[in-house]
Structures are given as structure tokens and as C-alpha cells.
Amino acid sequence: MATGNAFDVVVIGAGPGGYIAAIRAAQLGFSTACIDEWKNEKGGPAPGGTCTNVGCIPSKALLQSSENFEDAGHHFADHGIGMANLTIDVAKMMARKKTVVKQNNDGIIYLFKKNKVRFFHGRGSFVKKGEDGYEIAVAGTRAEALTARHVIVATGSNPRALPGAAFDEKAILSNDGALAIDHVPKTLGIVGSGVIGLEMGSVWRRLGAEVTILEALPAFLGAVDTQIAVEAHKAFARQGLRIVLGVKITGVDSHGEGVSVAYTDAAGSAQTLACEKLIVSIGRVPNTIGLGAGAVGLALDERGFVTVDDDCKTNLEDVWAIGDVVRGPMLAHKAEEEGVAVAERIAGQKPHVDFNTVPWVIYTSPEIAWVGQTEQQLKAAGRDYRAGTFPFMANGRARALGDTTGMVKVLADAKTDEILGVHMIGPMVSELIAEAGVAMEFRASAEDIGRICHAHPSLSEATKEAALAVDKRALNF
Ligand code: FAD
Ligand code: NAI
């Protein structure tokens, strides 16, 4: 039990990694505290981190609003629904987004109370290691001093800026500003065609902005299975998202009228993109600002990540680190899995997090989702595999929905038929990918999925059919 401010476990950061770690530690019987400095508009606590405040949750709220707008403007007519004088009230859309964010902030505060996690609002920093454990100072509305037997660092990440183009969140926007634009810009430039660039580009294009994305790499979505990436590139081009590959940004000039981005294109010619606003989404950097890592000798790597082993152990005894501040994909669910696993390790259990079964989802339309290895990775590894694909065009539910873009692709070992990767592009694949994750966790074969009875008509039948297609016996294609 906690005596005063002495705890078994103190978690620094209440993003998806930290708050989940704190809840799991409390469930396991540890006296637990969680410290987070995020402030809402009124200066009050806003637990949930990047994910809840300026990441996963608000971006999905805006993606939903803008998709509804696009459907109403372009697709409802197919159903015989007339939509004259369609308008978008950006202020109302943003107010709804704020409500969704607040519901999530409040939900975490409720969960802390329910699980008896003590929450401290303010910045937590290491002071020193004392006889009773680590001393941690909290600088908030009230200064507090805590001691902890175990510390979990879950301080997340911050957006990476282009050199010489600091974020002002008015013209040059990080994810923070991109989620809070107060009107539809006529022209929107985006640097980086990764996950944020594509999701935010989709939101503002659907609402009427002319969007140009400048990407340094010559290939589009290089980490995605190539067949899926090619399909995605075609779909986005059809929608009017302009994606320029192989650019080198040479300068960014922000002036009263907007922003000019100078770049050389893939052919080496100098070009300029003039836009009202510019989103820079070129990846994120680990956040250890103000953590006091130096005070206790917590090791960081050359890129600023907290150094951890496979079990999220740092170089310091009883100090762990999870989520975006350590190696591995920067995903909320990866942070959560690490949080649960660390709490269980502190309790002496032996959990395991398998990065190979961490799903990825890009919430564009069509959605893109995958788990496991891509075809190009299997080829590079010299793995003998078989592939089965099934297009949504041949799926009854997709036809009824009026959204037949894309496909499901299953990759399985040629000999054992074990599923090695599942790749999807199309309607609601963010939900369909869970079945593939379950199958891979249980080391299922493609035939296993092919033999499971799937409801008809459902989009999930496309997964079953792609699994059957591995053995060249799809029934509906
Ligand atoms: P964070 O969520 O960054 O939380 C860290 C918390 O620690 C913050 O609240 C911070 O204020 C606090 N903190 C930092 N230092 C201190 C300190 N010294 N004292 C006290 N508090 C401190 N991932 C997905 O899986 N799906 C998505 O759809 C998705 N969409 C995204 C959309 C956008 C626009 C962005 C930017 C990211 C998105 N992500 C998504 C990534 C996801 O948000 C991160 O991977 C996730 O938030 C990482 O969780 P975390 O707990 O490690 O860190
Ligand atoms: P990202 O890593 O997904 O994409 C960055 C892109 O910018 C890459 O394509 C890269 O080649 C390009 N780039 C880098 N430097 C450049 C330069 N100087 N000029 C032009 N292009 C350049 O990073 P992003 O989009 O910033 O997102 C950060 C992280 O947040 C993601 O890696 C992801 O983990 C997470 N995220 C997850 C989401 C989801 O799960 N749906 C949604 C949004 C973010």
C-alpha cells in the first residue's frame, strides 16, 4: 500500500502506453501513481497523451466528419438521396472533435479512480535514486515529491520539424495545428506522404482543399505491400490527392499570404509549391524533455530514444520505458501492449509482445491495413510462400455498400500453409484486420481461415476467400 507519496509503481506519462500500464499495475495489486502534464484549454488535466489529444482520436473524428461530407456530396445520389446546398460548418465539426477528445480524457480520469491509480497533473522528473527507491518531483499547480520502487517512462513523442521551418501552428502546422484548422484552406501543402500526411490530406481534400503532398522517397508507401501500395496510389490519385514523389525540399518561406516550398523534383528540376497552409508530417522524435534522465543516468540512444532491451528494461534497475519513447513502431496499441507487459513483468510474470503481429491501419478511404510480412519482405528473405487475393468487387456486401475498391491478400508458407502476412485495402479493413491478427497469434494456416464459417453477406468473407485463394480455390472469383 502507498504511504503518503510512496508508491510501488510510478508511471510518467498518461498516453496509451502510460495510462494502460498504470491500470494494469494497479490491477496486479501495486500502489500506483501516474503523472501527466498535458493541459486542456482551461489548464486542467487532459490524460491520454498524443493519441487522445492530438493524434488517433481527433484525427479519426475529423476523418469521419469529412467522409460523411464526401459521401453526402458524391455518393448519396447513387442511393437516390438528393442533397441540395450541402455545406460544411468547420467550427461545428471541430467542436464535435473536441467533445470526442474530452469524452476520452474523462474516461481515463474515471478509469484511474476506478482502479485506484493516483493521478498527478504536472511534469514528472527524476531527482535521484534514494534508499526507498527513485525520487520523482512533480511540477504542476502543486509541487509534489514522490518515491517509487519501479518507474515506467512513457513520455511519448513530438513532431519532427523541417530544418529552418519551425512549427508556428498558423501557417506551418504539425499534427496539432493540422487537427485545428478553422476553415477549409484553398490550397494545402503537406510534406511527407506517411500516415499523418495521407490521413490529414484526406480530411482537407474531402472538405474542398486542393492538396499536394511532397514526399522524399521515390516509392509510395514503401513499408506497405507493393501490390496494396500501387492500388492505394491509384485510388488517391483518382480522388484528386496530388502526390509528388522523390522530392528534395530546399527551402520553406512563410509569409503573410501563405507558404512557399522550394524543392527539386525527381528529375532534378527546381519547383515551388505555393500553399495557404503547410502540414509537415515527416515522422516524430522521442520526448524526454524535462524528464531528468541525466539526474539518474538513464541511457538514451543517439536519436534520443530511451535505450531498452526486448523486455522494455532500461539500463537502470527497476526503470522501464515503453511506447513512442522507445524503439519500434510508433503506434498506440504497441504502446499499450508494452505497458501491460511491463506491469506484468514487475509482478514476476513472463508476458511476450510479438512485433510481427502488431497490426497497422491507415484510416484513409479506402482504408489500408496489414499484419505480418509483406510480399517484398518474403521475397527478400528467400521464403517460399503462396499468395491468395480476393477483390472487394466480387464481395456482395461491398457491392451493397457501394464501395468495391481494393482487395484482401493472404500470404502463407508454401509448405506448412502458416499465414505469414495479411494485407488489405478497402472498406472497413481497419476492423477486418483483427481476424488476421488472431489467426497469426494462433499460428493458423490459410486453410484454417478458409474452413471457418463467415457470415453472409459480410466484408469478412473477402478474408475467407483470399485464404481459399492461397490454394487456388476461391469460390466467388
Ligand atoms: P504519448 O501518447 O505521446 O503520451 C505521452 C504523454 O506523456 C503525454 O501526455 C505527455 O504530455 C506526457 N509527458 C511527457 N513527458 C512528461 C513528463 N516529464 N512528465 C509528465 N508527463 C509527461 N497510433 C495508432 O495506433 N493509431 C492511430 O490511428 C494513430 N493516429 C495518429 C494520428 C496522429 C495525428 C498522430 C500524431 C499520431 C497517431 N498515432 C496513432 C500514434 C499514437 O498517437 C502514438 O503512437 C501514441 O500516442 C504513443 O503513446 P505513448 O503513450 O507512448 O505516448
Ligand atoms: P511517417 O513515418 O508515417 O511518414 C513520414 C514520411 O515523410 C515518410 O514517407 C518519409 O519518407 C517522409 N519524409 C521524411 N523526411 C522528409 C523530407 N525532408 N521531405 C519529404 N518527405 C520526407 O510519419 P508521420 O506521418 O509523421 O507519422 C508519425 C507516426 O505517427 C507514424 O509513423 C505512425 O507511427 C504514427 N501514426 C499512426 C497512424 C495510424 O496508425 N493510423 C496515424 C498517424 C500517425
Image: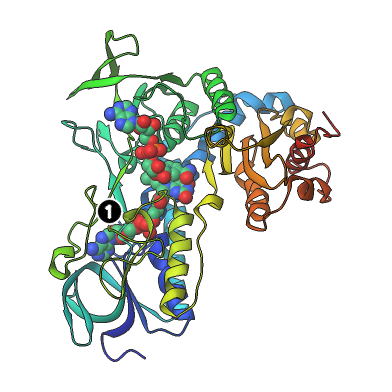
Residue visible at 54% across and 41% down?
64
> Percent from the top left, x then y, of residue 36?
29, 66
Q: In screen coordinates, is 395 left or right of 287? A: right
- Which residue of the protein is positioned furthest toward the right in this rendering? 475
Determine whether 329 is above or below 188 in the image. below
- What amino acid does circle 1 point to? Phe
Instruction: Inspect this view and state whether residue 393 appears.
Output: yes
Q: How many labels does the image show?
A: 1
Q: Name the residue under label 1.
A: 305
Closest to the observer, 397 or 340: 340
Q: In screen coordinates, is 158 left or right of 367? A: left
Determine whether 301 is above or below 262 in the image. below
Determine whether 74 is above or below 110 in the image. above
Q: Quadrant of ligand 2?
A: top left
Residue visible at 37% across and 84% down?
31
Residue visible at 38% across and 65% down?
18
> Percent from the top left, x then y, of residue 334?
46, 56
Q: What element carries label 1?
A: loop
Instruction: Inspect this view and state whether residue 140 appears.
Output: no
- For the C terminus, the image quarter is top right
Q: In screen coordinates, is 45 left or right of 381? A: left
- State how the image is colored: rainbow
> Percent from the top left, x then y, of residue 83?
63, 27
- For the N terminus, the image quarter is bottom left
Q: How crowded is mark 1: few (under 14 residues within 10 Å), some or many (20 or more)?
A: many
Closest to the observer, 120 or 213: 213
Q: In screen coordinates, is 452 left or right of 300? A: right
